[in-house]
Image: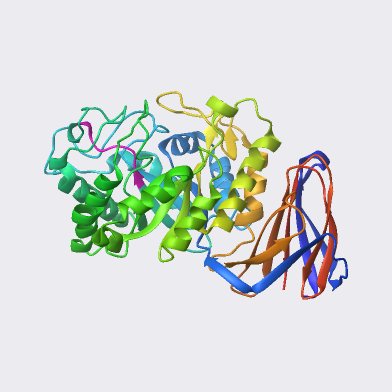
Amino acid sequence: MKKLKLITTDLKNNKYWQQEEREASKVSDCMKVINIYPEVSYQEIEGFGGAFTEASAYNYSKLSEKLKEQLIEDYFGETGLKYNMGRVHINSCDFALGNYTYIEEGDEALRTFDIAHDKELILPMVKEAIKKASGDISFLASPWSPPAFMKTNGDMNHGGKLKGEYYEAWAKYFVKFIKAYKEEGIEISSVTVQNEPMAVQTWDSCIYTAEEESLFVRDYLGPALEAAGLEKVDILIWDHNKEEAFNRVRDTLKDEKAKKYTKGVGVHWYTGDHFEALELIKKQYPELKLYFTEGCVEYSRFSDSGEIKKAEMYAHDMIGNLNGGISGFYDWNLLLDEQGGPNHVGNYCAAPILCDSKYDALDKKLSYYYIGHFSKYIKKGAKRIALTRYTDKVQAVAFVNPDGERVVILLNKGEEAIPVTLREEGKGTELTLESHSIVTITYK
């Protein structure tokens, strides 16, 4: 360790990714220490990204060419968040302009399958992101609902279940979607079986029990991908809140054949921390990869929260999830308007970047800068490493990048400044974490 770079975001002092370099020195303080242990490593990190919802793509389409370029740079460029992951939805979701599918209603044979709908708004945005990213973007695809005729309630919204006679057709629908996107130059690397399979929503939704999800993976989706030569596309289960994640994984993977096809688990944050659930899954199923597949600050619950509160929700959850074992992070909408939409059922929420109603300005929120403390500095292939901390007032996570660089992220959500001595093998630096601030320290 010779030099350390400190990157600070502190709204009170108007700091956004403010950088400072320091010489490392011997540190003898034993009272306020955070120790770093790079020889003890955990999961490998695949990256960070967000969702190309139709709402985001619609807002993007309304921007000037200059603002379009700025948005893509802000997320995928070297000066931005350096995202290398993206989520897309199969058929419509709540953050779409309305319900839609890729087939004509009642087409059981899928003869009319066509992704022309996505070519209008979503794919142009995706393709610009691919051009801008310094490396390949890993894409996750998730369905919110099958076509209405395939469901027990005859409606894409309000829950319902996939009818047993359509399990095979729905699995083939996945295959057609993946192949259609590949023809457009977009490689889908993973799919989830169903977004939020326990939630009956006023928008696009579909319910699966653990047994039904296991059956669909075992006898339909896994074999369909295999038969189509798409066995490298990973199947992720659950894709819902952490508080039920361990039980759901346990019950879904009781069947060994379903377990064989399942490569990972997706989780959301809407019912609280439950970071221990991730640790339980990693302990009991070490072969599975964990992904944070969706999270946002919902206006229905947190419309009155300030920007610091919103940003700290992100950083707190990201630190807890990474310490719990996740390998990849997908934020929700990439771009929303000032209302938090559009959303075809009025389920508005915040996003790291908003645009105004005239589409002539972009507004980077504090959460954007907080996310950057992770996505800009933790490189693909990094491994989480061990640390110890002297107080729970500091939230912390650490990594070693493939080139040997250490990345340590420290969060102070409190009202008081906190002194910290960062130390590895007796060398490091002393710093002060100001109230409501986040600091990333990098060094070799």
Res. 82 image quadrant:
bottom right
Question: Can residue 328 be seen in the rendering of this structure?
Answer: no
> On the picture, is 242 further left or further right than 175?
right
Quadrant holding the C terminus? bottom right
> On the picture, is 155 further left or further right than 203?
left
- Residue 194 in percent (x, y) is at 33, 44
The front one of 143 and 132 is 143
Give yes or no for residue 145 being in the magenta stretch: yes
Colour mapping used in the image: rainbow
- Residue 257 in percent (x, y) is at 24, 61
> On the picture, is 198 further left or further right than 271?
left
Residue displayed at 36% across by 37% down = 198
- Residue 109 in percent (x, y) is at 11, 44
Query: Considering only vertical position in the picture, is 380 above or below 353?
Result: below
The front one of 202 and 17 is 202
Question: Can residue 193 be seen in the rendering of this structure?
Answer: yes
Number of marks: 0
The front one of 360 and 350 is 350
Give yes or no for residue 189 being in the magenta stretch: no
Range covered by the magenta-colored residues: 142-148
- Residue 292 in percent (x, y) is at 49, 50
Residue displayed at 17% across by 37% down = 163
Res. 147 image quadrant:
top left
Quadrant holding the N terminus? bottom right
> On the picture, is 205 further left or further right than 322?
left
